[in-house]
Image (spheres, rainbow, N blue to C red):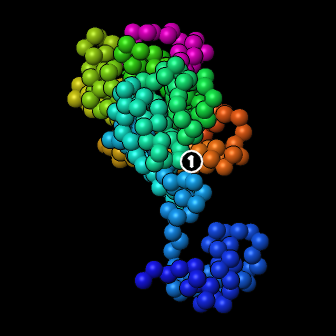
């Protein structure tokens, strides 16, 4: 039998309003009274009807999270962070998989789920500014990722240029002079352009040549794409002494090819990835990687949606989450990495 507020009030010997104030975490409840009501809640096993609560506020209690690659470990970890934060605010997350396809991103962004969601968190790959400029509907939209849009929407991201520069600076400090970049998008400058820009800027700042022949474009960003790009560079006779990959799966794919070609990591070629996913920490050679604060990105995204719903949000803004470079065996070797935090 479902326990009601009335049952809890009778058990605790207080009014229904007092129980409601405790359930809704209102501040102006005496500690002794809060403890008394909470004891009755625990003993009776009362669970609030979150659906009814959201409906009374004219909401559904659902936030949509639209991601391009659910199979990518980074997006899986990011989704977990969003779901955890949403749950703390009594919200459910509806996952949408866009596949990074423009038509699917358009469908999601233009509100085809508007009647069932209170807000949308979107990580776009192919959408252009014009696609979002005339967006219909009043559902709050929060953007994630590297794409840069000059639009009145909150955008949660890390400083990709600065992060890429730190990755390249690390390689240069180790004495590497020919640093390749794997993962520029073939036929488009997006969405890798900020990381490519950081690669260019840091090489120039170090007084090293910016060799565009060491930029390997790909159609996707998976393990196979990284392996194909590394194979192509080597088959063209290019032998960089370091590789900076757009993400960890590409870096891992590249390292597999280097191993197959008899090249040692990091002795012959050092490798840096991006996103710090779990699999990169447990390979035969652990991967140095830029580690975005995924928990903060998820938290900031959810809080931005809720702030818009509550009418307490400032003007639309870009919010920077933190990141750090985690040094592991793929750049500093096994002995040096033994004293390095593993993430």
Which image quadrant for residue 58?
bottom right
Q: Nearer the viewer, residue 304 or 131?
A: 131
Is residue 167 visible to us here?
no
Q: Is residue 99 left or right of residue 146?
A: left
Q: Which residue is mark 1?
A: 302
Q: Is residue 36 above or below residue 310?
A: below
Q: Position of residue 237 (x, y in %)?
A: 29, 11
Q: Nearer the viewer, residue 151 or 220?
A: 151
Looking at the image, residue 25 lies above or below residue 116: below
Residue at point 64% right, 83% down? 37
**Residue 213's x, y, as percent?**
39, 9
Residue at the image point whose x is 74% and y is 69% from the top = 27
Looking at this view, is 89 or 220 the one in front?
A: 89
- Front position in the image: 194 or 263: 194
Q: For the residue carrying disc 1, how many other residues have a C-alpha within 10 Å: few (<14), some (14-19), or many (20+)?
A: many
At a point 47% along the width and 45% down the height, the residue shown is: 115
What residue range appears in magenta? 196-217
Q: Residue at x 39, y 25 (%)?
A: 102
| Relative to 145, 162 lies left or right | right
Q: Is residue 221 visible?
A: yes
Q: Would residue 23 be found to the left or right of residue 287 on screen?
A: right
């Amino acid at each position: 039998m479902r326990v009601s507020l009335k049952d809890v009030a009778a058990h605790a010997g207080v009014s229904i309003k007092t129980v409601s104030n405790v359930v809704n975490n209102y501040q102006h409840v005496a500690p002794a009274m809060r403890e008394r009501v909470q004891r009755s809640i625990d003993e009776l096993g009362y669970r609030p009807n979150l659906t009814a609560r959201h409906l009374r506020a004219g909401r559904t209690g659902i936030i949509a999270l639209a991601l391009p690659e659910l199979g990518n470990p980074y997006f899986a970890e990011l989704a977990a962070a969003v779901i955890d934060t949403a749950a703390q605010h009594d919200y459910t997350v509806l996952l949408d998989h866009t596949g990074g396809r423009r038509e699917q991103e358009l469908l999601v962004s233009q509100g085809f789920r508007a009647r069932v969601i209170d807000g949308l968190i979107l990580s776009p790959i192919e959408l252009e500014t014009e696609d979002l400029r005339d967006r219909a509907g009043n559902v709050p939209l929060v953007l994630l990722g590297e794409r840069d849009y000059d639009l009145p929407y909150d955008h949660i991201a890390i400083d990709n240029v600065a992060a890429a520069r730190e990755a390249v600076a690390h390689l240069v400090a180790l004495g590497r002079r020919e640093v390749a970049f794997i993962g520029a998008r073939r036929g488009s400058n997006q969405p890798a352009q900020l990381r490519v820009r950081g690669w260019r800027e840091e090489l120039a700042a170090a007084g090293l040549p910016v060799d565009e022949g060491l930029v390997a474009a790909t159609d996707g960003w998976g393990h196979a794409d990284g392996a194909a790009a590394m194979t192509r560079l080597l088959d063209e006779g290019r032998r960089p002494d370091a590789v900076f990959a757009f993400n960890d799966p590409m870096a891992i794919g590249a390292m597999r090819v280097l191993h197959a070609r008899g090249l040692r990591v990091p002795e012959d070629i050092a490798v840096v990835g991006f996103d710090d996913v779990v699999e990169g920490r447990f390979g035969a050679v652990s991967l140095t990687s830029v580690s975005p604060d995924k928990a903060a990105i998820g938290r900031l995204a959810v809080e931005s949606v809720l702030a818009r719903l509550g009418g307490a949000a400032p003007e639309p803004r870009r919010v920077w989450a933190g990141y750090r470079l985690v040094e592991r065996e793929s750049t500093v070797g096994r002995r040096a990495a033994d004293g390095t935090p593993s993430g």
